[in-house]
Image: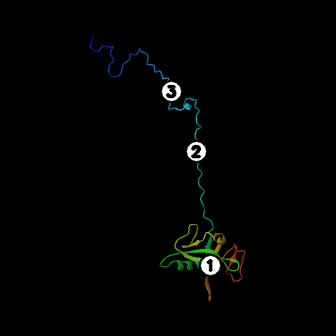
Amino acid sequence: MSALSSEQPRAGPSRQSPSDPPPVVVPSTKVNTSISSDAFSPQTAARPPPAPKAERPRPTIKATKAALTITPGAVQRLRALTSGPSPQLLRIGVRNKGCAGLSYHLEYVDKPGKFDEVVDQDGVRVLIDSKALFSIIGSEMDWHEDALSARFAFKNPNIKDACGCGESFTV
């Protein structure tokens, strides 16, 4: 025979004939200590994750009646007041003042507050202070000018009582 006989192992993969049985692998009896003791206990299947819920469309806020209506005379006066070299906004609020308890307060501001209600009408932008919104809601703002005075007048349906001079009101 040759120097390489079939009795000596060859380097490389061993070839088996089709008649040879497959090799048997015997597991070792040594227990792996890195696996917990629970790993050998019977396992139960986890619940499947809940089915995703169908997303409802978020409700949209529909425009309703404005918190304050402004008459054409008041719109003209507000345009004249707010269109200056430094454009500002007019904020309407209420203060504790007068015989009946509350009085309207108007002030110029540079930008709206965090919770201010913005009323846009005929190109004029007016802010309503968030604290005064419930006292002013549904009101009408008008501009009155006569020989002795010029002022903004409010027609407020929420007023329960007013003083005789018309300076203050109660809601």
Q: Is residue 165 toward the left or the right of residue 45 in the image? A: right
User: Pointers 2 and 1 in contact (CB under 8 A)?
Assistant: no
Instruction: Name, please, the residue furthest toward the bottom.
Output: 147
Q: CA distance from mark 2 to mark 1?
A: 55 Å
Question: According to the image, label 3 marks what residue?
Answer: 31
Q: 10 Å neighbourhood of mark 1: few (<14), some, or many (≥20)?
A: some
Q: Residue at x 59, y 79 (%)?
A: 73
Question: What amino acid is found at the position of numbered circle 3 in the picture?
Answer: Val
Look at the numbered disc 2 and give the secondary structure of its residue: loop
**Quarter assignment of residue 144:** bottom right
On residue 142, the disc is: 1
Quarter of the figure with residue 51: top right
Residue 156 is tagged as none
User: Disc 1 marks which amino acid?
Assistant: Asp
10 Å crowding of disc 2: few (<14), some (14-19), many (20+):
few
Quadrant of the image for the N terminus?
top left
Q: Earlier in the sequence, mark 3 or mark 2?
A: 3
Q: Amino acid at mark 2?
A: Pro
Residue at x 54%, y 79% (from the top left corner): 81
Q: Which mark is residue 52?
A: 2
In terms of secondary structure, where does tag 3 sit?
A: loop
Report whether 129 appears left or right of 166.
Answer: left
